[in-house]
Image (tube, rainbow, N blue to C red):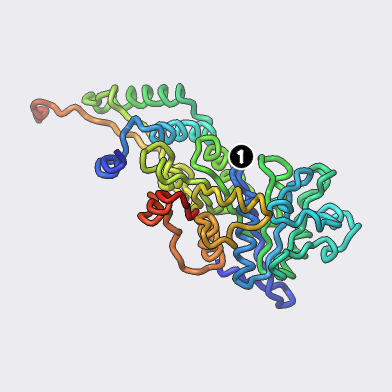
Amino acid sequence: MSFFNGLFGRKRDSSAELAKQRLLTVLIDDRYKLTPEMMAQLKADLAEVLQRYLPAIDAEQIEVTLSRGEAHDLLKADVPLRRAAEPPSKR
Amino acid sequence: MDGKRLSVSGVIMGRVITVTSGKGGVGKTTTTANLGTALAMRGARVAVVDADIGLRNLDVVMGLENRIVYDLVDVVEGRARLRQALIKDKRLPELCLLPAAQTRDKDAVNAQQMIDLTQQLRAEFDFVLIDSPAGIEAGFRNAIAGADEVIIVTTPEVSAVRDADRIVGLIEAAEKGPASLIINRIKPRLVSRGEMLSVEDVLELLAISLLGIVPEDETIVIATNRGEAAVYDPNSLAGRAYINIAQRLAGEDVPVMAIPDQQGVLDRLLSLFGRRRT
């Protein structure tokens, strides 16, 4: 089993992976007082603002993550855009 | 991290390093005892200080509990001179313990008194290792007050890592950082099965530099029972890990020791015959 984990990366449902994800949430809450509810609200607000400029945004697919660095932490938003079937016609 | 600093009069002053964790029971005292012993085995003059006032423990881990006459609070309150209170190790004459008071509480000393004490100690020793109490309150603040460097000990468990993160923040706020990390009680087989946070996971979560890693090892229990540091036992994997950490702490350019993932072939053969090496 560990052989396959080593080859294909850790299984997403391993208890260590779960521990890491839970800790990430808890540490963000501890450090920034940003609860999971607030994070969800942040995502919704972000989607709303971005959609004013980019209607192709898939609000459901937005992923906001906080990653930790030595000098500072990083708030990162991954915003997937639906690829249009045809490019918008030029005026 | 060359560690030699000069006082105003040009005397070489030692480094004051506090070992802390936030959560209790992750191995601060064992770490302090083993690093102190390992550094003294290299020929350094080392003082280990038990700053856990009221919950004295470093003395029993080092097997020096029968030799205590005076303690840290006696020195701070002027009932004893530092030299009277320092207890020489049984084997290493350059290793000394300053025990905590057992009958007082953490309010018996304040931060300024701890700074004054560490100033006295650093004039006499190359390394002053302070064993901090658990928690984030006065005892912890006193323990880091005189520190040049802070080592955070954690285990790969959610509660210990969470508390370590609080400590990282407090050390930054106290301008004692950046702290370095020791990850203790790693179980390599559990990590390889994906059932324990890996060294990489913990480093990613805490984002501080790694000083060393120590495997879960029953020789620590045995060494503690005997009141002898595990670094004396050449068969102790944890002891070897602490020697590696002491080398790195002393500024040697050696990599973090790798922990063997599996039992070696020889170990398996020995265990077939009912013998174990570790």
Task: Kindly identify the residue that appears in the image at 73 percent across and 42 percent down.
Answer: B138
Q: Is residue A16 above or below residue B118?
A: above
| Residue sitting at x 70%, y 59% | B48
Q: Amino acid at mark 1?
A: Lys
Q: Secondary structure at mark 1?
A: loop
Quarter of the image that includes the N terminus of chain B: bottom right
- Of B57 and B64, the residue lying toward us: B64
Q: In the rendered view, would you say A19 is above or below B260?
A: above
- Within 10 Å of disc 1 (Cα), the crowding (few <14, some 14-19, many 20+) is many
Expressed as whole percent of the image width and height from the top left, the position of residue A5 reads 29, 40
Instruction: Tell me residue B142's x, y (percent).
Output: 73, 49
Query: Of residues B208 and B202, which is closer to you in this image?
Result: B202
Is residue B167 something one can see in this rendering? yes
In-image side of B28 versus A55 (left or right): right
Residue extending furthest toward the bottom = B10
> Is residue B176 at all visible to an observer of this figure?
no
User: Residue lying farthest right?
Assistant: B79
Q: Nearer the viewer, residue A27 or B217?
A: B217
Image: B233 above or below B166: below
- Give the residue displayed 58% in from the left and 48% down from the top: B172
Report whether A74 appears left or right of B122: left
Give the chain of mark 1. Answer: B
**Depth check: B88 or A18 in front?**
B88
Q: Position of residue B60 (x, y in %)?
A: 72, 51
Q: Which residue is mark 1?
A: B23
- Left or right? Give the position of B199 relative to B76: left
Residue B35, percent from left and from top: 60, 59
Number of callouts in the render? Answer: 1
